[in-house]
Image (cartoon, rainbow, N blue to C red):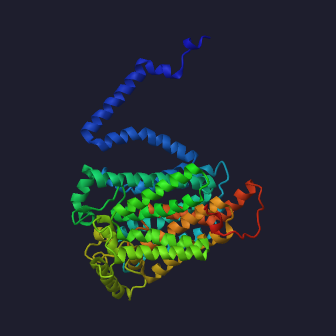
């Protein structure tokens, strides 16, 4: 048969009925968009794509995690353009991934045992403590508990087992890092647009509705990009600057090393233009951790000298003081800074209030959730600023100690694996970067509430899982190379950093 005379499936689209159906759908979409608004019209257009996406998700649940890695950068900023509770998308995706695994279990064996880990146990304990807070007699609102608990414990409890089960290979780690790097770079580009060309109408409306109180200081805009606020943008970009800076030292691929250098420099620049003083703690703490991991005294001394130089530059000179970003960063080193004194005064008030409340005032009692649900309470009207102070106020001294124990247990485990267990050079570098980034965020979280916000929280939880599975990954990598599966490791971290 002549192939040009054969009738194919697409040829039926030229028939009257398919054309009529297509035109009817176009007219219906146009009418609904004109009468009901842009959101309805977009929903109709997106609906078929969403159905296809769900089908793919149920076949390959890993797609859901990759979607979360992208969305968690954009999800809070999207609210400026289309007002809705975008955070529920993360909840929905996590639920759908578990549902997909449930149905796949009828056909194949799901390796649930991979999630058996000290980390899974720790996040379960923390989630259990968060559930207990629902019956805290000091809690003034169950709605505030529900909303605040999600970012505080629920996301961590749900995503960590998923990562252990379906996102645990070296190529998964690389994809995660590439997504992180691309989104961080785009974040800095968006920040540059705000800095050099100004904000768009939707961002201006957000500033006019109250955002300007914290984001326009002395006539200068604090850059926030597509993140929730300038504080989160600055800390997250500093996080990327540290992680990709360390990765650049270890990358064996020339192209990937150039990629890491570009992302790192863009991240540090984004941190600077954000005007977030506390963000400088990310590269400071991350650099200290890197020097410790290298176990090299001369390098440690050189790093200490460099750190002292940075301190002297900001605290005891006026160099580049005509630059607004440098001038604002410099105030972070002033012990008499008015903002610092207000924070210390608030902490003293909280100390008195919480002395008789070992379990705190209830999750959601402080910050935005407190202002929204219990605006007339003491905790709602006392600024916490710091992530750790917020944990202390919400969950009490018991919750704070538990939270710090979990974080330092994870950090020490990751550092121990880097220094003594992981032998593959490239994997060692990747885990070292994640450990340094985690310590940097922990340092910044003392001054700002960045740890539990998007995108930092998802990045941190994913990094934690890879810190724990690094020894297993290392054994598989070395087995694939034909190297011994076990044996003492004597190499030092500094021995594998390119000169």
Where residue 489 sits, quadrant-wise, is: bottom right
Image position, residue 389 (x, y; %): 39, 78
Considering the image in quadrants, where does the N terminus appear? Answer: top right
429 versus 396 height, above or below: above
Say whether residue 138 is left or right of residue 491. left
Where residue 427 sits, quadrant-wise, is: bottom right
258 versus 232 height, above or below: above
Residue 360 is at least partly visible in this image: yes
Image position, residue 86 (x, y; %): 38, 54
Residue 145 is at least partly visible in this image: no
* Residue nearest the viewer, comparing 316 with 332: 316
Where residue 472 sits, quadrant-wise, is: bottom right
> Which residue is located at x 65 percent, y 63 percent?
496
Image position, residue 232 (x, y; %): 38, 64
* Residue nearest the viewer, comparing 344 with 242: 242
> Which residue is located at x 56 percent, y 75 percent?
300
Considering the image in quadrants, where does the C terminus appear? Answer: bottom right
> Which residue is located at x 50 percent, y 69 percent?
286
Say whether residue 67 is left or right of residue 409. left
Say whether residue 221 is left or right of residue 242. left
* Residue nearest the viewer, comparing 125 with 434: 434
* Residue nearest the viewer, comparing 331 with 346: 331
């Amino acid at each position: 048969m002549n192939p040009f005379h054969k009738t194919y499936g697409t040829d039926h689209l030229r028939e009257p009925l398919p054309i009529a159906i297509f035109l009817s759908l176009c007219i219906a979409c146009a009418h609904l968009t004109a009468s009901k608004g842009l959101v309805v019209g977009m929903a109709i257009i997106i609906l078929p794509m969403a159905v296809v996406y769900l089908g793919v998700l149920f076949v390959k649940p890993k797609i859901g995690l990759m979607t979360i890695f992208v969305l968690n950068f954009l999800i809070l900023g999207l609210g400026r353009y289309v007002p809705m509770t975008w955070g529920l998308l993360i909840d929905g995706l996590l639920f759908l991934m578990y549902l997909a695994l449930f149905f796949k279990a009828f056909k194949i064996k799901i390796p649930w045992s991979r999630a058996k880990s000290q980390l899974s146990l720790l996040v379960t304990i923390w989630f259990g403590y968060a559930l207990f807070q629902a019956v805290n007699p000091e809690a003034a609102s169950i709605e505030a508990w529900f909303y605040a608990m999600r970012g505080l414990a629920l996301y961590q409890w749900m995503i960590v087992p998923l990562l252990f089960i379906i996102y645990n290979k070296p190529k998964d780690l690389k994809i995660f890092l590439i997504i992180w790097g691309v989104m961080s770079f785009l974040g800095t580009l968006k920040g540059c647009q705000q800095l050099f060309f100004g904000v768009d109408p939707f961002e201006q409306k957000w500033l006019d509705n109250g955002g300007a109180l914290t984001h326009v200081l002395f006539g200068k805009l604090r850059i926030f990009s597509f993140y929730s606020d300038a504080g989160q943008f600055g800390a997250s970009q500093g996080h990327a600057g540290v992680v990709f800076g360390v990765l650049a030292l270890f990358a064996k691929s020339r192209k990937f090393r150039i990629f890491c250098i570009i992302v790192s420099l863009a991240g540090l620049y984004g941190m600077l233009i954000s005007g977030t003083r506390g963000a400088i703690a990310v590269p400071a703490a991350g650099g200290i951790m890197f020097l410790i991991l290298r176990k090299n005294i001369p390098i440690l001394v050189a790093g200490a000298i460099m750190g002292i130089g940075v301190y002297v530059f900001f605290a005891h000179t006026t160099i580049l003081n005509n630059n607004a970003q440098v001038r604002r960063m410099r105030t972070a080193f002033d012990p008499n800074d008015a903002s610092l004194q207000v924070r210390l005064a608030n902490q003293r008030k909280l100390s008195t209030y919480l002395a008789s409340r070992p379990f705190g005032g209830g999750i959601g009692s402080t910050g935005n959730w407190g202002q929204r649900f219990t605006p007339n309470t003491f905790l709602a009207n006392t600024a916490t600023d710091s992530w750790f102070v917020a944990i202390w106020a919400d969950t009490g001294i018991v919750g704070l100690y538990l939270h710090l124990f979990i974080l330092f247990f994870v950090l020490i485990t990751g550092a121990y694996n880097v220094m003594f267990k992981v032998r593959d050079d490239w994997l060692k570098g990747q885990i070292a970067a994640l450990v340094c980034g985690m310590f940097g965020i922990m340092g910044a979280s003392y001054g700002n509430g960045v740890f539990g916000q998007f995108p930092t929280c998802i990045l941190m939880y994913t990094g934690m899982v890879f810190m724990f599975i690094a020894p297993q990954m290392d054994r598989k990598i070395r087995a694939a190379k034909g190297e011994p599966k076990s044996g003492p490791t004597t190499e030092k971290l500094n021995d594998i950093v390119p000169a």
